[in-house]
Amino acid sequence: MNDSRTDEQGAGLCAGCAHALVIRNDRGSRFFLCRLSATDPRFPKYPPLPVRQCTGYVPSPEDDDQDAS
Ligand code: SF4
């Protein structure tokens, strides 16, 4: 079973967003911190998941399948 993949799918848009920061606690749980929350009060620090729609969503470069090398 691939837990991390399931976890990312459960997060919705945050899983592939350039503004998301993944936080792991001691018990192995993962949280998505929205970095936009630091500058824009419309965005909660820890958005309720899954996020299905978000005006701040920007696709993460790491989510691209393109190989930049
Ligand atoms: S901008 Fe939206 S999609 Fe991106 S991390 Fe914040 S809440 Fe998630």
Image (spheres, rainbow, N blue to C red):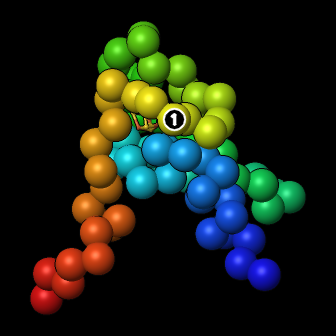
Q: Considering only vertical position in the picture, is 33 above or below 69?
A: above
Q: Quadrant of the N terminus?
A: bottom right
Ligand 1 picture quarter: top left
Secondary structure under tag 1 reads: loop
The quadrant of the picture occupied by the C terminus is bottom left
Question: Where residue 50 sits in the image (x, y, percent)?
Answer: 62, 39
Decide if residue 55 is in sight here.
yes
Q: Residue at x 66, y 51 (%)?
A: 10
Asked if the beta carbon under badge 1 is closer than 8 A to the nearest atom of ligand 1, the reply is: no
Q: Is residue 50 above or below residue 4?
A: above
The three-letter amino acid code for the residue at tag 1 is Arg
Left or right: residue 13 compared with residue 2:
left
Task: Tell me what residue is drawn at x 29 percent, y 50 percent.
Answer: 59
Which residue is farthest top? 41
Q: Report the side of 4 relative to 58 (left or right).
A: right
In percent of width and height, residue 61 lies at 26, 62
In this picture, residue 49 sits left or right of residue 64:
right
The answer to whether residue 23 is seen in the rendering is no
Where residue 25 appears, as percent x and y from the top left, is 75, 53
Taking the view exactly as shown, the residue that stands out farthest to the right is 27
Residue farthest along the left direction in this orientation: 69
**Residue that appears at 68% across and 59% down:** 7
Mark 1, residue position: 52
Badge 1 local density, few (<14 within 10 Å), some, or many (20+)?
few
Q: Residue 43 location, x and y as percent?
A: 45, 20
Residue 54 falls in image quadrant: top left
| Residue at 49 percent of width and 44 percent of height | 14
Within the image, what quadrant is residue 48 found in? top right
